[in-house]
Amino acid sequence: MTKTPEEIERLRWCAELTTIGQRKALEAAQPGCSELEVWAEVRLAMEEAEGKRLVVAGDLTSGIDNTAAISGWPTDRVMQEGEPILCDLAPRSHGYWGDSCNTIFLGEPDSAFQKLYTTTERSIEVVRETLRAGITAAEFDRAVRSVFEEAGVNNPIHVGHGIGTGVHEWPRIVPGQEVTLEPNMVVMVEPGAYEPGVGGVRLEWMYLVTENGNEVLSGFPHAMRPE
């Protein structure tokens, strides 16, 4: 579960690929574009940085119902004003995986969606404050999950997972997982809120666990629209 310095450098590059892809998604997502058109631009940006074809997993799905359903491959669905987009990018480079997620919104969200987004943003603050060596995965999960419970919104999937030569590795950050986090573990933390009739939000970064805290390896902003 812990990574060598060489592995960490490979994962840093994978995180950089996701940064390139997520920034392109923010730029490319516009009303009237199809999900596939945006996906093509995102993939091209990452592959130009890599210099060759990439294996890419993840999601790019739009609309209230689709994002509330948590995941989905891009289709020819045309994006509309007033809709959320989940962009979850996981490229594989030199035998290692990156992962990431951002939630984009076309236009201005209503108060119900804004609550989902604001709650998820608050959970990221708890991640930065809490993630460190010595805490168990269950303790960390509980700290992050409590933000959603206190707000009364639904976070039905795992809080996170390890990453390396597999896109989902141990440790799993889920209730009851008593493994202790150690320095040089690299984990994906992906808190989210999903509500039928409102939409879905997921914000995911790659983190390096350190003795006293954590380092964010992802370089893209969690932002609903370009800065």
Image (cartoon, rainbow, N blue to C red):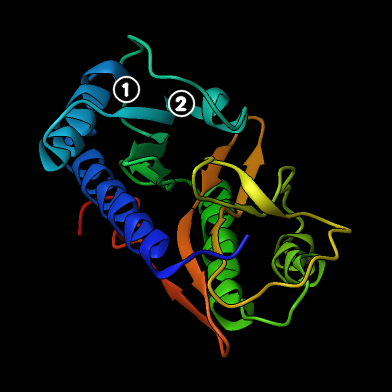
On screen, residue 183 above or below 57: below
Residue at 72%, 82% in the rendered image: 134
Q: What's under tag 2, amino acid-wise?
A: Gly
Residue at 53%, 45% in the rendered image: 201
Mark 1: few, some, or many residues within 10 Å (few <14, many ≥20)?
A: many
On screen, residue 182 above or below 123: below
On screen, residue 214 above or below 28: below
**Residue located beneath label 1 in the image:** 79
Decide if residue 51 is on the left or right side of residue 169.
Answer: left
Which quarter of the picture shows residue 49?
A: top left
The quadrant the N terminus occupies is bottom right
Q: Are marks 1 and 2 in contact (CB under 8 Å)?
A: yes
Find the distance from the CA under tag 1 to the CA under tag 2.
Answer: 7 Å
Residue at 46%, 66% in the rendered image: 4
The answer to whether residue 30 is seen in the rendering is no
Please count the marks in the image. 2
**Residue located beneath label 2 in the image:** 63
The quadrant the C terminus occupies is bottom left
Decide if residue 49 is on the left or right side of residue 135.
Answer: left
User: x%, y% of residue 53?
Assistant: 20, 25
Which quarter of the picture shows residue 70?
A: top right
Residue at 43%, 29% in the rendered image: 57
User: x%, y% of residue 60?
Assistant: 40, 28
Mark 2: few, some, or many residues within 10 Å (few <14, many ≥20)?
A: many
- Which element is circle 1 on? loop
Q: What's under tag 1, amino acid-wise?
A: Met
- Which element is circle 2 on? loop
Residue 217's disc is none
> Among all residues in the image, which is located at the extreme bottom?
212
User: x%, y% of residue 61?
Assistant: 43, 26
User: x%, y% of residue 66?
Assistant: 53, 23
On screen, residue 108 above or below 62: below
